[in-house]
Amino acid sequence: MTSLDKPTTEDTSADDARAVTEAALFEAFGGVRGMVETVLPGLLFVSIYTVNKDLHMSAIAALVVALVMVVVRLARRDTVKHAFSGVFGVAFGVVFAMMTGNAKDFYLPGMLYTLGLALAYIVSAMAGVPLIGLMLGPVFRENLSWRTRNPGRKKAYTKASWAWGLILLGKSAILFPLYWWADTTQLGWVLVALKIPPFLLAVYLTWVFLAKAPPPIDVFAEMEAEEERKAAASE
């Protein structure tokens, strides 16, 4: 191997930063299993409703499978935040649909949540406190240090928050007209189809922005080093 073929320290550190970013995004957004837990209840609901048009059976089946996924995670002692969020989303949908008797209302809470989240991403980016930074800061062990000490990273979080906001806003622009004009099965299948691709696009763009950003400042390591320094000085 020639000197040109050997990886430089800079290349190695860049690869390490990308690996850390990938792992952090995987943890924060639930990975493949989190995506399955997000899609499965809605897919089951629309599948059953398409066959028999039975609102109660469709809603109960969706709620049961969401609860089963939580129980499985608890049994395996895995992180349950994604499964629990799925249960709450399905439960709200079931309540809405049962109260109104309109099967399309099963999807309404999730659609409103998506729209609200899109606005939260955009408003937080405009305010200089990007939501993605608030979410990923603790995962990267940097907390809020990016706000004042790492401007390049703050810029990356701002870009990522804009990306999430605009992608989710575009998704809402498709779904809400369908809520008014399409029937339940049409809305349900479109919603299922739009669960994963926009999410993957937003995660990919987040990875691109963060992979090019400066590395995070590990504030926990700094605090530990400071405590060790004080302990050594007091001896």
Image (cartoon, rainbow, N blue to C red):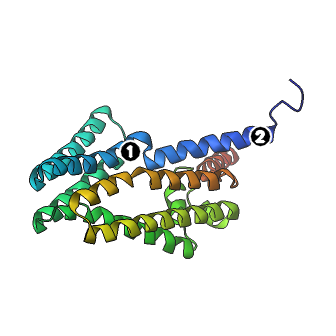
How many marks the image carries: the answer is 2
Could you tell me how far apart the alpha carbons at marks 2 and 1 are, in whole angstroms?
Answer: 32 Å
Q: Which mark is residue 34?
A: 1
Q: Would residue 59 be found to the left or right of residue 146 on screen? A: left
Q: Position of residue 6 (x, y in %)?
A: 83, 30
Above-or-below relation of 160 to 231? below
Q: Label 2 belongs to which residue?
A: 11
| Earlier residue among tags 2 and 1 | 2
Q: Which mark is residue 113?
A: none
* Pick the front one: 38 or 192: 192
Q: Position of residue 222 (x, y in %)?
A: 64, 51
Instruction: Please state which amino acid type lies under the numbered disc 2.
Output: Asp
**Residue 112 in view, yes or no:** no
Above-or-below relation of 176 to 40? below
Label 1: how many residues lie within 10 Å, few (<14), some (14-19) or many (20+)?
some
User: Which residue appears at 26% of the width and 40% of the height?
Assistant: 69
User: Which residue appears at 69% of the width and 62% of the height?
Assistant: 152
**Residue 119 in view, yes or no:** yes
Mark 2–mark 1 contact, CB under 8 Å? no
Above-or-below relation of 218 to 132? above
